[in-house]
Amino acid sequence: MEIIAKGKIVALLVFVAFWIAVLVYIRLVQGGRKVEIRRLAALDAIDEAIGRAVEMGKPIMMNPGLGSLSGTFAADTVAGLAVLDYCSRKVISYGARLIVPIAQPDVMPLASDIVRQAYLAAGKPQEFKAEEQIRYLSPDQFAWTVGIQGLAEREKPAANIMIGYFAAEAMILAESLARVGALQVGGLTNTFQIPFFVASCDFVLIGEEIFAAGAYLSKDSKAIGSIAGEDLFKIVAIITIIAGTILSLLGVPGIPALIQM
């Protein structure tokens, strides 16, 4: 009986190497090593968007997307909630008003708690108004979309931050908020919808950049270490692929057999 299925040994070694790189970098960052994360203009624009809303006396809409906390796109939702945590704290410190449109029931209590904790940390628990700030609309994709369109027309937010999972409604939302004059920061991994965000939003996080958002904004050592470890592994993987391709083209024996282990 084989402990490791044939053809899976290389995949296992790659998996182990990946996690070793991540864990090593987390320890290095926790030990005081300084690791810089590439500047993300879209996240820097969040402060600008919040400041703009304060100057105009209008609210800010922070949309964590259509996804839930389980399933294929759970990571996208978690990334959006990480940005919500940052936005909540900034909004409170600037004295602005926050609106969070929610689609999924399981996201509702977590989003509400994130905003509530931000008010508690700022010493302003009495200013948290869940029914006004956390708007549960509908788990139905387009009912949720229409609900956001209605909020946009009534509230006229000065800024719209959309980071999470978005599907066919992406263009509708972006255009609706653009029509009311909102400065928009978007971010998603859905490759079918990225072009629509690029065309409609002022700043965009593309693909895995949304997963780096929490680390970039929070400066948390574990999050930064994870991103640094992933980047190192990607560099090593790219070099290995290029080297393997060259060796295979040169006819060096054993390369195909090694890959198939």
Image: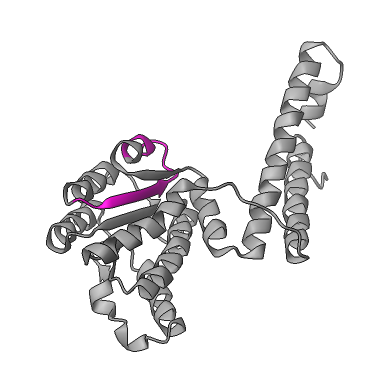
Residues 97 and 214: in front is 97
Q: Give the residue drawn at x 66%, y 55%.
A: 226
Screen quadrant of the N terminus: top right
Q: Give the residue drawn at x 74%, y 30%.
A: 239
Residue 155: x and y in percent read: 16, 63
Residues 227 and 138: in front is 227
Residues 259 and 89: in front is 89
Q: Is residue 58 above or below residue 6?
A: below
Which residue is outermost to the front? 55
Q: Is residue 95 above or below residue 242?
A: below
Screen quadrant of the C terminus: top right
Residue 176: x and y in percent read: 19, 48
Quadrant of the rendered structure where residue 115 is?
A: bottom left
Residue 54: x and y in percent read: 28, 66
Quadrant of the rendered structure where residue 85 is?
A: bottom left
Q: How is the image coloured?
A: one colour
Q: Left or right: 79 with respect to 131? A: right
Residue 60 visible, this angle:
no
Quadrant of the rendered structure where residue 11 is?
A: top right
Tell how many labels: 0
Residue 135: x and y in percent read: 25, 69
Q: Provide the residue span drawn in magenta.
A: 181-196
Q: Give the residue drawn at x 42%, y 87%.
A: 123
Q: Give the residue drawn at x 29%, y 45%.
A: 170
